Image (cartoon, helix red, strand yellow):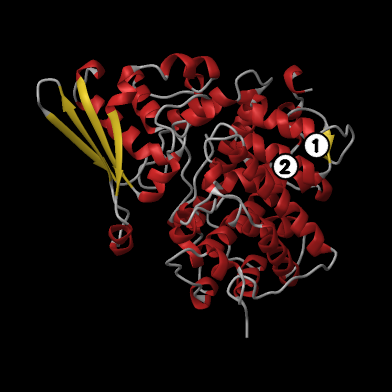
């Protein structure tokens, strides 16, 4: 009987021809991730991983902190950097930060195979769809149980993309995903600590190593997703969906077109974004004086509630996972920026009394299980004059339903690439990635900084 991994591998080895829309969306996602990767090069988590593993000077793959290392270590360091600021995209089918794993993993082996821009996009689309297929069996239940989909689903699905870029056939892709399943790990209990961005780096490294092992013929069980003591049984949570082989094999439209990735407008945990966007919506419609807010009640999903564990953040990492901090910033500044999540900014702004007026509740598990569409997050403000102001949002800005404007996208990438020689030219080249015979135009991003050397 054909297994889930074999079904996914067969699809990935001979995917339907990608549309112009799918490729444009992939270009956008890759550009967004590379910008986030560069912006995260100076983060403490990136430097810690660099100091631990990045001392080799002449490896095959570049490091955003400068120098070169093995493909495995390059994926680890660059993946950590891509997720360090929590500014990279979300991907609901995998419950993952998909691109922060995929792009560093692919770049780590790109020089080995002399990858063109088009080949990079092809492999990205394979990896993203594979993450969607792997995630389809465990869905939100896996995430709600406490597993970090970035480093679980991300390890397995991205292994297929790396194997594809290496030129492996369907059997090789299946071996890579099986090995990726053995490497999958990572708990959401680490959210709000530097271990969280390390999860993305770990998953990128896992994907590279799984593909390289598969290329040498190393193989695990091919029913490891659905079989006894396998991924679904162990990682599925209380209400896993299970895998539908016919649905996987019959997929013709790429997930990037049907669901899409969710690039971030705000550099903080995506669990805050619906509420932050609701607040920004309100302020575009009416004047709201933050000092006249008596209380701000936020009603969110249970997994989102559990992700945001820091009502009184002590540092910039905790601040990214604090609804009071992020929402208070939105009210005070009508937007959030990278500059709001530095040690000095948090030391100052976390003392704002507005944080103590912000509270959270969540939907019950049964409400979420019974919902046929995403439940909206709700914001309820009580003002000093006794008035009540309410607003809800079911989707955050940035995805297919409510996409960024071109100016929003350009501003984010320019902010992240600030200081790069030829940054505008790099951004333009990423927009036309299919046309590039190689990836040498990215070299200015990998020259390192004094602080990290």
Identity of the residue drawn at 55% across and 63% down = 235
Neighbour tally class for label 1: few under 14, some 14-19, many 20 plus, Cα within 10 Å: some
Q: Which of the labelled discs sits on residue 3, or is there none?
A: none
Q: Are marks 1 and 2 in contact (CB under 8 Å)?
A: yes
Secondary structure category for the residue under label 1: helix
Single out the residue that lies furthest toward the right: 58
For residue 53, the mark is: 1
Looking at the rendering, which quadrant does residue 444 occupy?
top right
Of residues 180 and 89, the one nearer the viewer is 180
When asked about the image quadrant of residue 402, the answer is top left
Residue plotted at (66% across, 24% down): 42
Looking at the image, residue 239 sits to the left or right of residue 1; the answer is left
Q: Residue furthest left?
A: 386
Which residue is nearer to you in this view: 256 or 277? 277
- Tag 2 or tag 1, which sits nearer the N-term? 1
Q: Nearer the viewer, mark 1 or mark 2?
A: 1
Number of other residues with Cα within 10 Å of mark 2, as a class: few under 14, some 14 to 19, many 20 or more: many
The residue under label 2 is 76
């Amino acid at each position: 009987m054909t297994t889930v991994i074999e079904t996914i591998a067969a699809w990935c080895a001979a995917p339907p021809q990608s549309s112009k829309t799918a490729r444009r969306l992939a270009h956008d996602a890759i550009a967004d991730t590379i910008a986030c990767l560069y912006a995260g090069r100076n983060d403490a988590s990136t430097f810690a991983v660099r100091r631990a593993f990045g001392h080799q000077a002449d490896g095959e793959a570049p490091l955003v902190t400068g120098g070169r290392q093995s493909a495995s270590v390059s994926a680890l360091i660059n993946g950590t950097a891509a997720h360090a600021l929590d500014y990279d995209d979300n991907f609901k089918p995998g419950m993952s930060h998909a691109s922060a794993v995929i792009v560093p993993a692919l770049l780590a082996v790109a020089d080995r195979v002399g990858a063109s821009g088009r080949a990079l996009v092809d492999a990205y689309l394979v990896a993203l769809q594979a993450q969607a297929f792997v995630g389809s069996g465990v869905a939100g239940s896996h995430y709600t149980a406490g597993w970090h989909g970035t480093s679980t689903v991300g390890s397995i699905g991205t292994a297929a993309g790396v194997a594809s870029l290496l030129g492996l056939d369907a059997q090789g892709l299946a071996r890579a995903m099986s090995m990726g399943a053995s490497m999958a790990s990572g708990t959401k209990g680490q959210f709000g600590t530097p271990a969280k961005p390390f999860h993305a780096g770990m998953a990128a490294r896992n994907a590279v190593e799984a593909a390289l092992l598969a290329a040498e013929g190393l193989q695990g069980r091919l029913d490891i997703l659905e079989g006894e003591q396998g991924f679904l049984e162990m990682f599925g949570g209380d209400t896993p969906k299970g895998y539908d082989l016919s649905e996987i094999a019959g997929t013709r439209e790429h997930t990037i077109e049907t669901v899409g990735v969710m690039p971030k407008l705000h550099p903080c945990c995506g669990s805050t974004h619906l509420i932050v966007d609701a607040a920004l919506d309100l302020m575009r419609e009416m004047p709201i004086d933050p000092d006249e807010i008596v209380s701000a009640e936020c009603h969110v999903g249970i997994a989102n509630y559990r992700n945001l564990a820091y009502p009184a953040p002590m540092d910039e990492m905790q601040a990214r996972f604090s609804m009071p901090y992020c929402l208070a910033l939105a009210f005070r500044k009508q937007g959030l920026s990278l500059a709001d999540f530095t040690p000095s900014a948090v030391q100052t702004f976390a003392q704002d009394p507005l944080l103590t007026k912000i509270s959270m509740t969540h939907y019950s598990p049964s409400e979420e299980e019974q919902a046929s569409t995403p439940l909206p997050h709700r914001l309820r403000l009580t003002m000093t004059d006794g008035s009540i102001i309410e607003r809800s949002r079911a989707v955050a800005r940035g995805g297919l339903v409510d996409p960024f404007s071109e100016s929003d996208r350009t501003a984010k990438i320019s902010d992240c690439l600030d200081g790069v020689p030829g940054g505008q030219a790099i951004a333009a080249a990423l927009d036309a990635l299919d046309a590039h015979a190689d990836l040498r135009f990215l070299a200015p991003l990998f020259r390192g900084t004094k602080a990290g050397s």
